[in-house]
Structure formats: structure tokens, C-alpha cells
Amino acid sequence: MMLVVLCVLPVEAADDDRFSQLVAPVGARVLTDRTSSIDHFRLVLSAQKRAAAVTFADRELRISGSLRRLAWESSEKLDLDGLLEPLQNELAQGMSARVLYQCQDLDCGSSHFWANEIFENGRLVGRDNQQRYMVIYLPPTAAATLSTQRASATLLLVYATQRGPRQTVVGLDMIETSDNVLPGVVNRADISSMLSISSGWLPGFQVTDGQFDSVASAPLLNVLTSLSQGVQQRLFLVVHCYQSNDMSVNQTCSDRLAQQLRVASFDAGAELNVSGQAALALPPDGSLVPALRFVFWPRR
């Protein structure tokens, strides 16, 4: 069975060798073992989608930090759940970890995507109906959080699949990063505070499966519909999508989400000024998820 929630040991005990020994199949051959610094690393945290020959996810982050990348192959066909069980058992002995995303078999989409685009190792390509992917977050230690610098968290990216009738391959990325990778909780105060300036990016704009999520975006909608008519007339909202290298695809996505936001925020005859402008502005946090920008037209 797939693990849904993990608690983990303190990060000071979570050394690279311990995790690599837990994930590596017994008697497996090492394919890759290297370390590097990373910038704009593509962290995928949702299911794959494909449009205009581009594979992407609704939730992706770009992070920086340090990376240790390992990969193994085994000449045996191993049970994938059993292969990951030692890691899960070890992590369950402590506290504070979170599974940010996981999938199995066909729900993971294309094995080529994970192997070539995320783990950058064609030897990890396997069967789409026999694969596992997990992203595990280990928070900074209590001692590290007392530092004057922002403490680094640890991310474990695990990918395992069957290559053939008698071969199993596993990839493990261990990332140290001080970037914020946890989904934030947005409230009305955050949104109202942002609207106190003349322009910027509004938090709380949530998209699920390519559609504007009015339930998850309730704090945003509550603030927007509570604005006075005069303020609403001066407020211009712009939706940006970043899912494709084809700008027309991004424009279609932006227009669709803009229309859905316009309808969801319609209140007693007042309609907000909402438009779509594709990827014509850099994303606010380096991620590729749709985002909402605002600007107030100056008073006369």
C-alpha cells in the first residue's frame, strides 16, 4: 500500500548514506552517484499533463540548493512497495516530515518524463504501469532554525520502476534547500494587505485540474467581492498561465481562468475587470502554476 502521511526522524540523523542504503536494492549496481549545486531545479508536485507536445504539472516549483543524485539497477524484478518499505519504516520512527506528492503505476503518467526530464537518466525509463514516485519533505532541525540565516530543509525524491521482466531501477535525489516548498495557507488579511499597494501578485488564486477552484479560492473571492464599487472599478486583475512553450496555449488557459474568475466573483450586477495575458510576465515565485496579478488605475 502507498504511504499517505509520514512522520520522520530528526534531520540531524537523516544523512545521505542512511537514506541511500534504505532505498538501494540489495546487490544492485550503482548507475549514478554525484553531487552538485542546483538552480531552478524542477520540483514536480502534481500529476502530469500534456499540451502542445509539452509535459507539465499543475503544481511545479523551481528551487535552488545542493543535490546528491543516485541511481541503481537490479537484475531482479522486485516488488516496488516492498522496496520502499524500509525507507517508510525508518521515517516513521520520528516526526515532522510530510509527503508533498506521491503516485503509482499509470497515475504517474509517462516513465520517460520522470527518467529523462526530472532525474535526467534514461536508464530509469521503465513500464508506465509499474512505477512509484514520492516527494518527502524533512524540516530543518530546531538548532538550525535558531540560525540568523534561513535554515535548509531536506527533500527526498524517490522514483522506482520495472525496466523489464527481470530488472528494477531506482532513482533517489536528496536536496538541501532554503527555498519555501510547502503550500502556504492564505487568509483574508494576507490578500487585503497586498491590495493596500498599487500593484503586485495576489495570493489565494487556486487552480485545480486546469479550472479555477472557487472553493479553495474562497478567501480571495471574499475580499474581492467585499471591495467598494469605486475600488472595484479601479482594480484590474490579470491571469497568467505558464504551462506551455506555445504562447497561444498559455493565452487560452489565461482567458479561460479569467472568465471563470469573473463569473465566480460576479456580485449584484458588479463585474470585476479580469483579463488574461498568457506568460507575458515572469511568475512571482518561479513556479509554473497560474497566477493572478493586479494593478489599480490611478484616481483622476
Image (cartoon, rainbow, N blue to C red):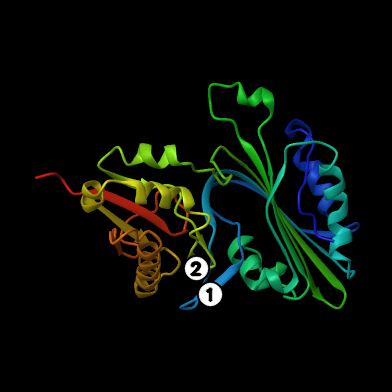
- Eyeballing the image, is 56 above or below 177? below
Q: CA distance from mark 1 to mark 2?
A: 12 Å
* Mark sitting on residue 50: 1
| Whole-percent x, y for residue 194 in the image | 35, 40
The C terminus sits in image quarter: top left
| Whole-percent x, y for residue 169 in the image | 78, 65
Left/right placement of residue 178 relative to residue 95 reads left
The N terminus sits in image quarter: bottom right
- Eyeballing the image, is 76 above or below 32? below
- Eyeballing the image, is 263 above or below 177? below
Task: Note whether residue 33 is visible.
Answer: no
- Residue 93 in which image quadrant: top right
Q: Amino acid at mark 1?
A: Arg
Left/right placement of residue 227 relative to residue 65 reads left
200 or 194: nearer the viewer? 194
Crowd rating for badge 1 (residues with CA inside 10 Å; few <14, some 14–19, many 20+): few
Residue at 46%, 78% (x, y): give it: 52
Query: SS at mark 2?
Result: loop
64 or 81: nearer the viewer? 81
Can you identify the residue that label 2 sits on? 210
Residue at 57%, 45% (x, y): give it: 181
